[in-house]
Image (cartoon, rainbow, N blue to C red):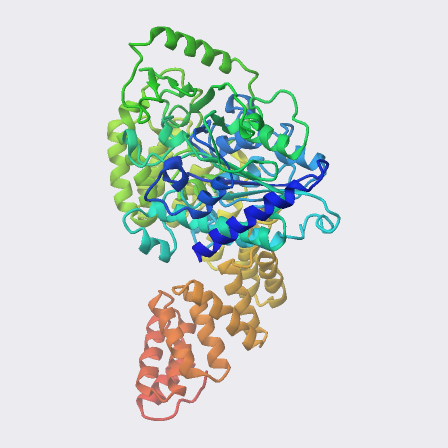
Amino acid sequence: MTVAIVLIVAVAAFYARRAWSGRSRGHRPNVLLITIDTLRWDHVGCYGAAQAATPVLDALAARGVRFETAIAHAPLTAPSHASILTGLTPVRHGVHDNGAFVLAPDIPRIATMMHAAGYATAAFVSGFPLDRRFGFASGFDLYDDRLPRGNAPRGAGETERKADATTARVLDWWPRPRASADAASAGRPWFVWVHYFDPHAAYDPPDEYRRRFAANPYDGEVAFVDAQIGRLFARLTGIDRLDDTIVLVTADHGESLGDHGEETHGVFVYDATLRVPWIVAGARVPAGRVVQTVARGVDVVPTLLDLAGVQIPAGLDGRSLRAALDGRAMSDEPAYVESLLASRNFGWAALRGLRDARWKYIAAPRAELYDVAQDPRESANQIERQPERVRSMSRDLDAALRAPARSAARPVDAEAAGRLRALGYVTGTGSPRGDGGGGRDPKDAIALINRLERAIADTRVDPARAATELRGVLAEDPGIVIAHRQLAVALSAAGDHRGAIAEIEALRSRDLATAEDLVLLSESLRVTGRREEAARAIEAAARLDPQSPEPALTEARALASEGHPAEAAGAYRRALDLAPDNAEALVGLGQAALVQGDVESAAAAFERVLSRDSGDVAARTGLGLVRGRQGRMDDAIALLQQVVRDSPANAEALAGLGAALARSGAPRQAVPYFERAVAAGLRTTPVLNGLGFARLETGDRAGALAALRESLSVQPAQPAIQQAVRDLAAGNDPSIRK
């Protein structure tokens, strides 16, 4: 399949060049921008990576132009993408971290420029740091950030969409843009941005790639994304659009993979995390050229505008690289780079610097200077040997920092913090500490940051181990507020709610508790029976962050678990007032309606979720149960079978499928689903009774008796079941049937 894709791309390249040569200069090409999260440049085949399996990107470079060196401006998704989309450095656009900043709506970005020039615009993003709430949707007719919700608590599942699912959404949009139905037929060109998140840690490629890259799953993720890009190119070929489409592929940042002691990315500004691929091909782009001029993230906007024939606005930090594409000489412009992760979240020093074709200067408590042309691994610090160069680059850096700056900071709401933690980020979860003019040098404590990141990842799979690790982190540096906050989360997840309460109360005593902390405090207080205090904590959270739906959602979850569906529905409605499309609130509203017997309202809520995300597991399960209640057994079975295929341990879907099959006259098929539901933890009287009577219908009287007796052990006050057990024990036919 991969070979076929490469052949399609190669053949299409030939016809693209031939077709373009006959087009008029007035024709506006389509523009496809692809950004691959966490793609390190030297893990792509055309950049010399022998271990790589990137035939599609390699073929793209062969039919276009590859920039040998390209530099991102920050090793984090949101600030780097803000530079890619605006042509401004982080100093100018003001986004310095994930989750804690919003790109201001009045900042022009490529989507608004292309839209004003008559382009249909669409974006398909795959990671939560680019959610529309952070300001990235401006200018797009369609901004598809529909991430799968899954079954994770507190929205933590809404973090990432796999590359094949994102590709499917793009292919659904082509060739008739939904946001502008007549765009294709009227000849209106389009600008499409596709963002793939997969190479981001944790590395979990699909099975085929996991087997092929067992020793290096990161490369498996990269290979999987490469194949999905091949699907895009194949579709463009199929609709005769590849010949008039400009394609630019780059990355927001790379991945350290252990270089300089950093396991992933976000802290350091070495080339391991800032050097990225930069490949341009298609209309108006010559083939087979390798350019030595350094490309930067801020150069994406002016270069694409120039190639598309759209006027480049004044005031950008980037410049068009069209001359370099055409083979003309261009002088290098230095790239501003920064990481404020350690300063914002730990109170340590910020890292800022400049990187040109040969030298990189990093301002830090122990400043660094590297001859990257001769020392690409940045292992020999030249700071003492090049004093004049240090002074010159330091002055240039100071000038870059004096540029008119934006303040885009915003409080991190509890939901966003939970999603960022689910991705392993320490960013966006702490209170800003300023820009870190001084403090501890991150080089001296990278092992501590690695330990903290591992603990964050462990919280979801082994919270007790995470708590131990976090206590170790705090023993070394008690001032890391995020570690205290994450320790409370880990203790709560491990069932130590009193310990979680103590951690959060300690934060409150120092006036450091956020709305996220108070939400968790409320949950822990409620579990320990302190309901009045829990209510006060959730009210305080709502006051602290009045725009977040999380306090209302937290209250709704508690009320639903305590058997108060009407009150839970009221809380879910309050959450929907703040976030009208919140999937958890809609599903909760549907479940509350179902419990109260309002089948039509339940169906409407579940269908509303599925209209936005057809793969939502909880909504599909709920709608399957609704269809069963309505007597539409075929529909119920089809929906629930789909859920069980996708989520084999979903106890509610298993039980619902068993019930639907039993009611459809297929008790033998129903039995294993009931049994799997019980094994998955749904040991309730309806499920056990359903299992018992399904077994009885198959002639398994002993199995039926065992299930019904287990049901009575859960709830003895079931007179009808008591009678059935007596009948079975006496060898009689039970006096009731399911």
Tell me residue 578's x, y (percent): 60, 43
Give 154 or 610, whichever is nearer the viewer: 610
Instruction: Write the residue at 48% across / 85% down.
Output: 665
Q: Is residue 626 left or right of residue 346?
A: right
Tell me residue 286's x, y (percent): 55, 36
Quadrant hosting residue 633: bottom right
Position of residue 505 relative to residue 329, above or below, is below
Tell me residue 142's x, y (percent): 64, 45
Q: Is residue 423 left or right of residue 582?
A: left
Tell me residue 5's x, y (percent): 48, 54
Instruction: Write the residue at 40% across / 15% down.
Output: 437
Q: Is residue 377 left or right of residue 314?
A: left
Q: Is residue 143 visible?
A: no
Q: Is residue 235 visible?
A: yes
Position of residue 312 relative to residue 640, above or below, is above
Give 624 or 383, whichever is nearer the viewer: 383
Give 208 or 658, whichever is nearer the viewer: 208
Instruction: Write the residue at 34% across / 16% down.
Output: 369
Position of residue 218 relative to residue 625, above or below, is above
Position of residue 311 relative to residue 562, above or below, is above
